[in-house]
């Protein structure tokens, strides 16, 4: 037994074997757990996209959830960590379309039915890659309950939810300005946009007054600043803030729209920012959401000059019809320069909205879409946070959540793609926004709406207890799950929301493959092992602040594994002459029996203190702090001090006791090495995964 400890711990020799042992034990499934406490603890894994592969955010989030699940399992809860994947409508369709393009064909060549067959083929081949990677991380999910948002039962749940909203009169079709991706040819919600900082220009354009008293005077013009001069071809007005003294005498007058050469009004509106540009803003109702609202207030016409293909329309004028947007911009600027109507051009850096899946610049344009009314649903989502039925950790994220909901617009739920949940209305070819279906995740995965009988998964495991997720989908997903749970089951789907840190590159930039700043957690696992990778992630997770990633902490995790390994070897060697079947067993009341040295008593007291601290910190979701305390106890108090002193006069019972209890505490953080060492201890009867928690 001890001979194995004569060589360094090699995770590659053990981790796959240990994971297979866990799977074969059946203990990932709560139905198979012994010593059931009678209480349930459930986490629904945020479903990764079937197109995805494990990134550092996934790895951190999975480790956090696994820590909670493993601790609760050891506390004898009937513990369910329910996994699954999301069909990711736009992303998956794009991936399959790219594959088809390599073959020289498009989805239109195949037709809808054949294309969807290709998507399903792709999903069956590649869709579970990320789940397999989660297993490499040590994720102890109940894989027998794995769900997919396009499963037959899940599709039924989505249909029932849609028809429920429709019956209540909350779903309607309307034409309004939405965010449009000309590449994907679909609408996007505001939350599906990614903003990239770009260097551009700010053009200051002169709009001549229709009744100018004297040609050539400076007050013959209103100067408007814009980053998109081509959209002026669809202007219906120029707006100023009523408090802006510069334009007080011009409100209500007419100006000439350059190039189009027709009159448009000057209107006043409190929504205009006086400190942007000149304080006078062009209003293009068909291509800007705020402009659309201003146009409704002032009864201005909406002129669509950009179509769904990202080309200029006939409404833009004969000279621009059919041009690409940037081509039209160049031509508009040239004409304005010829007319002497450009006052100046400045360099300007601003954020540009991009499609979150293909990276194309998004166009705001008017489109007929399906919407879900949000007024009453937003109230449901806010109510359960305000009354503390749903708590955010850290608490600061609660304000972000409530602020968005207080001003939320009706939700554009239709998408003009083929892959996804088809809108259940005759004659409609659109599919539902992916987030519409994922909003049902905590209960549709448990059999809703069919499973209503006593003892069903829905009855036992809903509501779940904890959601751990990233801050960028607080509004996109968290809020929508809350109001969905309350609307359909009368109770929020979880009581605690952990918003974990965002992992950035060491220099503070976002992690990105294209930028060369990304880190693949699978590379770390292959190099250092899963336990060391988990250690490196949690060690840096000290609250809600962003993590500037440093691999040195994974290296430290690898060294800590070796420390645990060597300590176990020493303890087993010291206990070898007096090994008993009850190795290290000890009742709590026997913590300080007679015959203990001062060093023995001190380490046992430190162990007890550490147990209480770690237990409390995990329950408070302060995982990094818990790991730091546990590390300090094991490395310094136990190894550096007590083991050194034990070389003179070892106490086998205390050595064994501290090792066993330390392995229990370490198990949620570093499950592989602790399970393996546990299996080498004499007299142990159970896998560590179901051993009783330290307290």
Image (cartoon, grey):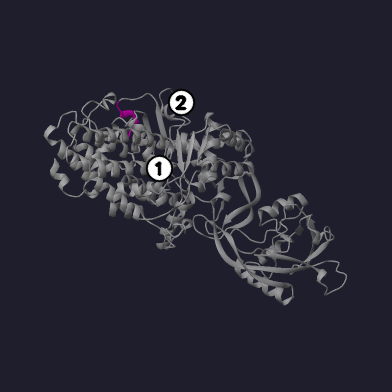
In the depicted structure, whether residue 46 falls above or below residue 332: above
Measuring from the top left, give residue 309's x and y in whole percent.
58, 60
Q: Pointer 1: what residue? A: 625
Horizontally, residue 118 falls left or right of residue 184, namely: left
Residue for point 67% across, 66% down? 229
Q: Label 1, label 2: how many angstroms apart (C-alpha)?
A: 41 Å
Q: Earlier in the sequence, mark 1 or mark 2?
A: 2
Measuring from the top left, give residue 247's x and y in whole percent.
80, 61
Crowding at dot 1, Cα within 10 Å, few <14 / some 14-19 / many 20+, comes out as: many
The disc label shown at residue 452, or none: 2
Front-most of 145 and 417?
145
Residue for point 27% across, 38% down? 663
In the depicted structure, whether residue 164 falls above or below residue 98: above
Q: In this view, which residue lies farthest toward the left?
A: 577
The disc label shown at residue 296, or none: none
Q: Secondary structure at mark 2?
A: loop
Residue 320 visible to an observer of this rendering: yes
Horizontally, residue 432 falls left or right of residue 285, namely: left
Q: Magenta stretch: give its range.
A: 28-34
Quarter of the picture containing the C terminus is top left
Q: Is residue 582 magenta?
A: no
């Amino acid at each position: 037994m001890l001979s194995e400890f004569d060589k360094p711990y090699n995770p590659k020799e053990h981790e796959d074997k240990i994971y297979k042992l866990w799977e074969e034990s059946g203990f990932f499934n709560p139905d198979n757990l012994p010593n059931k406490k009678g209480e349930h603890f459930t986490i629904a894994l945020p479903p990764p996209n079937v197109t995805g592969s494990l990134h550092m955010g996934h790895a951190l989030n999975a480790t956090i959830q696994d820590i909670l699940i493993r601790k609760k399992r050891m506390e004898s809860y009937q513990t369910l960590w329910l996994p699954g994947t999301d069909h990711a409508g736009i992303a998956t369709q794009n991936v399959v379309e790219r594959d088809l393009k390599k073959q020289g064909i498009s989805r239109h060549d195949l037709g809808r039915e054949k294309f969807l067959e290709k998507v399903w083929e792709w999903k069956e081949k590649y869709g579970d890659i990320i789940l397999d990677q989660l297993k490499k991380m040590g994720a102890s999910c109940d894989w027998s309950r794995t769900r997919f948002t396009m499963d037959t039962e899940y599709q039924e749940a989505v249909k029932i939810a849609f028809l429920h909203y429709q019956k209540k009169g909350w779903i309607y079709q309307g034409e309004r300005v939405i965010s449009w991706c000309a590449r994907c040819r679909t609408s996007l919600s505001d939350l599906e946009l990614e903003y990239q900082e770009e260097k551009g220009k700010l053009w200051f354009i002169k709009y001549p007054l229709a009744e100018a008293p004297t040609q050539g005077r400076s007050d013959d013009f209103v100067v408007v600043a814009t980053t998109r001069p081509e959209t002026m071809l669809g202007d219906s007005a120029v707006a100023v803030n009523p408090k802006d003294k510069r334009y007080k005498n011009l409100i209500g007058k007419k100006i000439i729209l350059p190039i189009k050469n027709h009159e448009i009004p000057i209107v006043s509106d409190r929504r205009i920012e006086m400190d942007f540009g000149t304080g006078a803003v062009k209003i293009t109702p068909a291509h800007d959401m705020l402009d659309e609202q201003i146009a409704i207030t002032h009864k201005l016409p909406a002129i669509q000059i950009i179509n769904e293909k990202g080309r200029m329309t006939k409404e833009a004028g004969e000279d621009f019809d059919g041009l690409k947007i940037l081509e039209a911009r160049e031509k508009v600027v040239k004409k304005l320069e010829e007319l002497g109507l450009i006052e100046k051009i400045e360099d300007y850096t601003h954020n540009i909205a991009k499609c979150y899946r293909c990276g194309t610049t998004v166009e705001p344009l008017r489109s007929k879409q399906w919407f879900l009314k949000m007024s009453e649903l937003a109230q449901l989502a806010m109510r359960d946070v305000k009354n503390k039925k749903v708590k955010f950790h850290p608490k600061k994220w609660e304000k972000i959540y409530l602020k968005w909901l207080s001003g939320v617009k009706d939700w554009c739920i239709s998408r003009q793609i083929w892959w996804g949940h088809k809108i259940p209305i005759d004659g409609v070819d659109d599919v539902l926004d992916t987030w519409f279906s994922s909003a049902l995740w905590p209960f549709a995965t448990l059999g809703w709406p069919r499973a209503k009988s006593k003892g069903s998964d829905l009855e036992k495991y809903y509501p779940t207890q904890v959601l751990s997720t990233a801050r960028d989908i607080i509004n996109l997903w968290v809020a929508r799950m809350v109001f969905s749970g309350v609307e359909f089951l009368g109770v929020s789907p979880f009581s605690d929301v952990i918003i974990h840190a965002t992992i950035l590159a060491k220099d503070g930039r976002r992690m990105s493959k294209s930028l060369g700043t990304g880190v693949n957690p699978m590379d770390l696992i292959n190099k250092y092992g899963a336990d060391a990778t988990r250690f490196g992630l949690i060690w840096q997770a000290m609250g809600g602040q962003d993590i500037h990633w440093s691999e040195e902490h994974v290296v430290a995790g690898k060294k800590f594994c070796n420390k645990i390994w060597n300590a176990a070897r020493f303890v087993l060697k010291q206990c070898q002459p007096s090994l008993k079947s009850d190795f290290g067993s000890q009742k709590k009341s026997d913590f300080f029996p007679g015959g203990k040295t001062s060093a023995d008593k001190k380490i046992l007291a430190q162990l007890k203190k550490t147990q209480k601290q770690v237990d409390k910190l995990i329950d408070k979701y302060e995982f990094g702090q818990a790991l730091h305390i546990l590390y300090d106890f094991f490395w310094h108090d136990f190894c550096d001090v007590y083991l050194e002193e034990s070389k003179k006069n070892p106490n086998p019972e205390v050595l064994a006791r501290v090792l066993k209890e330390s392995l229990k505490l370490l198990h949620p953080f570093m499950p592989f090495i602790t399970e393996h060492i546990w299996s080498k201890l004499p007299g142990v009867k159970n896998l560590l995964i179901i051993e009783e928690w330290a307290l």
